[in-house]
Amino acid sequence: MTETSNERMCEVCGVRPMIGVACTSIPYSCAYCAECARQGADPEWIFEYIWQDCNGEIGLIRAHNFVTWKDGRYITFEQWAEWRRDKGRSK
Ligand SMILES: [Zn+2]
């Protein structure tokens, strides 16, 4: 087997090698690095999925403390939703 020579990257941040696979919030099996696993972070596309699913009504989600990786740092769903609203306005 040559698996070790072909290192998979973390699916959340994409900048660190994965250490294992864990379930995300929706649930989906995702490759995590050590830091994203520690943060309990979700890939950003899951936030988009949730956003579409609830039409931007994030009241219920706010309580869950979801975290994702964006632009080099971890942000909460609330912070991400602010960015998403701005993006929606600028279109
Ligand atoms: Zn990561």
Image (spheres, rainbow, N blue to C red):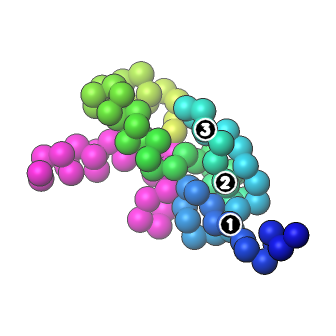
Q: Position of residue 10 (x, y in %)?
A: 63, 61
Whether residue 49 can be seen here = yes
Q: Label 3 vs label 2: CA separation?
A: 10 Å
Identified at 35% across, 35% down, the residue is 51
Identified at 44% across, 47% down, the residue is 45
What amino acid is labelled 1 in the image? Answer: Arg
Q: Position of residue 31 (x, y in %)?
A: 66, 54
Q: Earlier in the sequence, mark 1 or mark 3?
A: 1
Q: Label 2 vs label 1: CA separation?
A: 8 Å
Q: Return the residue found at the far bottom.
A: 5
What amino acid is labelled 2 in the image? Answer: Ala
Q: Which residue is mark 3?
A: 28
Task: Between residue 39 and residue 33, name the one nearer to us.
Answer: 33
Query: Total label count?
Result: 3
Identified at 13% across, 46% down, the residue is 89
Using a 10 Å C-alpha cutoff, classify the residue at mark 1 as few (fewer than 14 neighbours), some (14 to 19) or many (20 or more): some
What amino acid is labelled 3 in the image? Answer: Tyr
Q: Which residue is mark 1?
A: 8
Q: Secondary structure at mark 3?
A: loop
Using a 10 Å C-alpha cutoff, classify the residue at mark 3 as few (fewer than 14 neighbours), some (14 to 19) or many (20 or more): few
Q: Using residue 8 as the reference point, say whether residue 46 is left or right of it.
A: left
Residue 34 forms part of the magenta stretch: no
Q: Which residue is mark 2?
A: 31
Q: Earlier in the sequence, mark 2 or mark 1?
A: 1
Identified at 54% across, 61% down, the residue is 13
